[in-house]
Amino acid sequence: MSDAKISKVGWIGLGKMGTPMAANVLAAGFDLSVFNRSPGPMQPLLEKGAVAAPSAAALALDRAAVVSMVSDDAALESVTTGAGGLFEQARPGLIHVDMSTVSPEVSARVASAAEAKGIRYLRAPVSGSTASAAARALTILVSGPADACEQCTPLFGAIGRKHYYLGPAEQARYLKIAINMMIGGTATLLGEALALGERGGVDWRQMVEVFDNSAVASPLIHYKADMLADRNFAPMFTAAQMAKDFDLALEAGRRGNVPMPLIAMSRQLFGAMIASGRGEMDFFGYVTLLEELAGLLHEQNQALRKK
């Protein structure tokens, strides 16, 4: 199987990211079979030609590669080594590509179980948004067996703009966590900068535009600029999700004796968002927590009442 062209692909997990990614795999001409723990999200893909699988285990019967894109550590273990999971009926040589954001520790456990079954397990988390997923513009971070990565190059091309092979073990997990640390940290720092500028009387929309065209401009700030300018904090990635990823980072740091005081503080701030009812808000909505603490929301409401 190692030299065979991959044409039959299985897919586990059809959430906000998994659905557009799977749709692109189908659009690229792969024979796609899908499984989701709740069947509703499968329907649009079935209408486009995908086939429904009754279980994760069933995908192992006739697929050359199976991709999973699930929510967390527990979900990954459930769909792989759990009852009815992918590994239950997997044949030696099957490629399992997990694109979820999970801990290196749990990923290593899944890797050991895969090795015992002769499964080639690729850790392949992605960097990008739901819009990037729909546009096939994700960056894919890959570690695991190098030959399996090479064989999956056409599959990765159907999902993302670029992929990087990083090494034979958990390197992709660590780098994905590191990237999300930088993203979440940017949101907290920008939120505090915006609140300070707002207190100083700077026009909100002009302030966002200047940040987007200054020395601190970045692809992330540019991507979020319109959302910030409109104060639209509908979630592309929630504060609760970012808190989960920071927990992964802090646990990995604890295990590796890597001090991360800034990330520890930022995790507390995302926890405050959750506690104040902002957990399902986009994580860039952290600025609204700062505004509340500084009395700026009260001042905004007062100004509106005077109009």
Image: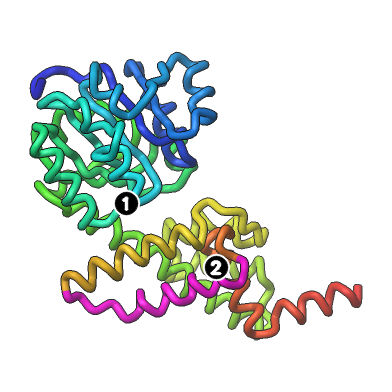
**Which numbered tag is attached to residue 73?**
1
Side of 297 where 258 appears, left or right = left
Number of other residues with Cα within 10 Å of mark 1, as a class: few under 14, some 14 to 19, many 20 or more = some
Between tags 1 and 2, which lies in front? 1
x and y percentages locating residue 35 in the rendered image:
39, 28
x and y percentages locating residue 156 in the rendered image:
27, 33
Q: Is residue 248 above or below residue 116?
A: below
Side of 62 where 223 appears, left or right = right
Secondary structure state at the residue bearing disc 2: helix
Residue at left offset 28%, top offset 39% = 82
Residue at left offset 59%, top offset 83% = 196
Side of 224 where 106 appears, left or right = left
**Residue 139 seen from this side:** no
Residue 131 lies within the magenta run = no
**Are discs 1 and 2 less than 8 Å apart at CB?**
no
Residue at left offset 36%, top offset 26% = 55
Q: Magenta-highlighted stretch: main secondary structure?
A: helix
Residue 260 lies within the magenta run = yes
Residue at left offset 32%, top offset 36% = 68
Instruction: Locate the N terminus and report the quarter of the image it occupies.
Output: top left
Secondary structure state at the residue bearing disc 1: helix
Callout 2 amino acid: Ile
**Which numbered tag is attached to residue 274?**
2
> Which residues are drawn in magenta?
257-277
Residue 243, picture quadrant = bottom left
